[in-house]
Image (cartoon, rainbow, N blue to C red):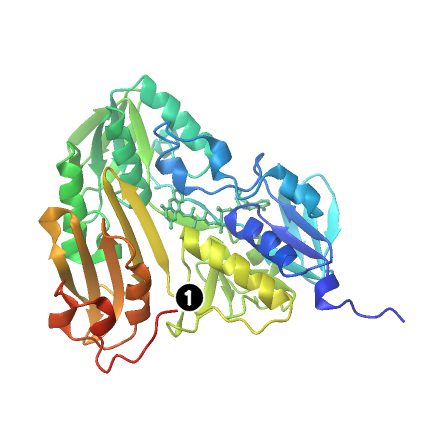
């Protein structure tokens, strides 16, 4: 009789070769996993981090090498088979196999879906002529195009659209942002802080148009973007209207999908041998008491590390409050927590100084905080999340953050 393999010896296939996938592989080896690890990714590069693609790399200030999660030598030295430029076509959860385009079949004891997300594209005439920004090639292409362009239209005032806007302004390209909502980032930050970002961009010469409904894109460069009776013209068009999780494999395999692959707090899908992490996963977060799909860098890392421990039999649950950062012009910010649009916003410091902390509150309870050009406070804000706080003390810069919770009896992690 063949004995079942121990957790440490199991064959693991990771589908997708992004940040979540690579972090999981690193963490598996660091935590003593001995079995086979195969990563299958459809890009031609080793796993890399995407944030520089809309920031330093896009401006030509950093090289790709700095974005890779681990050098290629790491995969060789740690006996991790990295299959680049290979697409997984199907996942067979009855046979525990993944099937690659080209016919190769890989068996697994456990599979991790880390297929990330792809740019959402508006269903309008000419949409295919707009650029999107997700992969290294997209960023390289846009960077090269900046050199011979004087103007860009950005459709969508979300994080990626605004970061690309800032990068374009830094290299002297005029930008018009066409945002569907009344303010950019409205859904993420609410009226007041979204207004702050709107002013930031306007003060850098960006033509920001809000409540716009883009109807079509014409031309092959220069382009004409139609909004109602108005036509906006530019050398480049970038579409940044959000991302769609790559759930095709999960759906076809019959796994539960609901705007993301549905997983429990241990990243298990509806099939116990398949787990999902990163942008593609809608995971139950025990700290929030709800399921969330988080499209952030830190989430890919945290879930990559956590899933490795889960696979090695450790009792680890997804309880990490979401964290996000952005860099735009000379603004650097970190956001931690999970707020609802109905939450109140209060500010410690003066927004006009460009250095402040915004807090989101549900009644007396702190749900999120955002430090703008104020550093080394994010852990303090994290420690306050979920606690009832004294608003007057919260916004008083002379009161340490560690002393604003009612009955403060917590310690920093
Ligand atoms: C331009 C840009 C800037 C960003 N900036 C920030 C930032 O400032 N701060 C922040 O917190 N977050 C930022 N993010 C978000 C962050 O990069 C993502 O949350 C993170 O990349 C998610 O990692 P992932 O591994 O889950 O998915 P991905 O990075 O998307 O990796 C998934 C990989 O799987 C591959 N794949 C999909 N299907 C298959 C298949 N069938 N077979 C083989 N391979 C497949 C995909 O091609 C991709 O290579 C940014 C994202 C982008 C695009």
Quadrant (top left/top right/bottom left/bottom right) for the C terminus: bottom left
Q: Residues within 10 Å of mark 1 (few under 14, many from 20)?
A: some
Who's the residue at 34% across and 41% down the image?
Answer: 122
Between 201 and 26, the one lying in front of the other is: 26
* Coordinates of residue 307 in the picture (x, y in percent): 56, 62
The quarter of the displayed image where residue 362 is located? bottom left
Q: Is residue 251 left or right of residue 207?
A: right
The total of numbered circles placed on residues is 1
Residue 178 visible here: yes
The quarter of the displayed image where residue 91 is located? bottom right
The quarter of the displayed image where residue 179 is located? top left
Between 228 and 140, the one lying in front of the other is: 140
Who's the residue at 36% across and 22% down the image?
Answer: 145
Quadrant (top left/top right/bottom left/bottom right) for the N terminus: bottom right
Question: Residue lying farthest right?
Answer: 1
* Coordinates of residue 279 in the picture (x, y in percent): 46, 53
Q: Is residue 39 left or right of residue 295?
A: right
| Residue identified by numbered label 1 | 320
Who's the residue at 47% across and 54% down the image?
Answer: 300
In the displayed structure, 75 sits above or below 20; it is above
* Coordinates of residue 80 in the picture (x, y in percent): 68, 47
Question: Residue lying farthest top?
Answer: 148
Residue 84 visible here: no
Who's the residue at 35% across and 70% down the image?
Answer: 412
Between 409 and 55, the one lying in front of the other is: 409
* Coordinates of residue 379 in the picture (x, y in percent): 33, 62
Helix or strand or loop: what does disc 1 sit on? loop
Between 59 and 217, the one lying in front of the other is: 59
The reply to whether the residue tagged 1 has its Cβ within 8 angstroms of ligand 1 is no
Q: Is residue 126 left or right of residue 261?
A: left
């Amino acid at each position: 009789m063949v004995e079942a393999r121990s957790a440490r010896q199991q064959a693991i296939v990771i589908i997708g070769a992004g940040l979540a996938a690579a972090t999981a592989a690193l963490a598996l080896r660091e935590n003593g996993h001995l079995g086979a690890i195969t990563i299958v990714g459809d890009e031609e590069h080793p796993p890399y981090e995407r944030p520089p693609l809309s920031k330093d790399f896009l401006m030509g200030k950093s090289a790709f090498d700095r974005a890779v999660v681990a050098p290629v030598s790491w995969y060789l030295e740690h006996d991790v088979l990295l299959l680049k430029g290979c697409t997984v076509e199907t996942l067979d959860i009855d046979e525990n196999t993944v099937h690659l385009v080209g016919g190769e079949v890989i068996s697994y004891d456990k599979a991790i879906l880390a297929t990330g997300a792809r740019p959402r594209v508006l269903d309008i005439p000419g949409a295919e002529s707009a650029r999107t920004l997700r992969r290294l090639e997209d960023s390289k292409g846009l960077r090269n195009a900046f050199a011979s362009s004087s103007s860009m239209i950005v459709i969508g005032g979300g994080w990626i659209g605004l970061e690309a806007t800032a990068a374009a302004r830094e290299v002297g390209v005029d930008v018009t942002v066409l945002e569907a909502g009344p303010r950019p980032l409205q859904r993420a930050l609410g009226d007041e802080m979204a207004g702050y970002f709107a002013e930031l961009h306007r003060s850098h010469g960006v033509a920001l148009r809000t409540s716009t409904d883009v109807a079509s894109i014409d031309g092959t460069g220069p382009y004409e973007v139609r909004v109602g009776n108005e036509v906006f013209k530019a050398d480049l068009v970038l579409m940044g209207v959000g991302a769609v999780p790559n759930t095709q494999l999960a759906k076809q395999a019959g796994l539960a999908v609901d705007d993301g692959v549905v997983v429990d707090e241990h990243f298990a899908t509806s099939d116990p041998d398949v787990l999902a992490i990163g942008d593609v996963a809608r995971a139950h977060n025990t700290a929030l008491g709800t399921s969330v799909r988080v499209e952030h860098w830190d989430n890919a890392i945290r879930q990559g590390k956590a899933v490795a421990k889960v696979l090695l039999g450790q009792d680890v649950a997804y309880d990490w409050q979401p964290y996000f950062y952005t860099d735009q012009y000379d603004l650097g910010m970190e956001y931690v927590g999970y707020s609802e649009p109905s939450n109140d916003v209060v500010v410690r410091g003066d927004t006009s100084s460009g250095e402040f902390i915004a807090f989101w509150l549900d009644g007396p309870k702190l749900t999120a905080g955002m430090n703008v050009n104020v550093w080394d406070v994010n852990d303090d804000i994290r420690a306050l999340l979920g606690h009832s706080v004294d608003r007057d003390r919260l916004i008083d810069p002379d009161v340490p953050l560690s002393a604003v919770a009612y009955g403060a009896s917590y310690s920093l992690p």
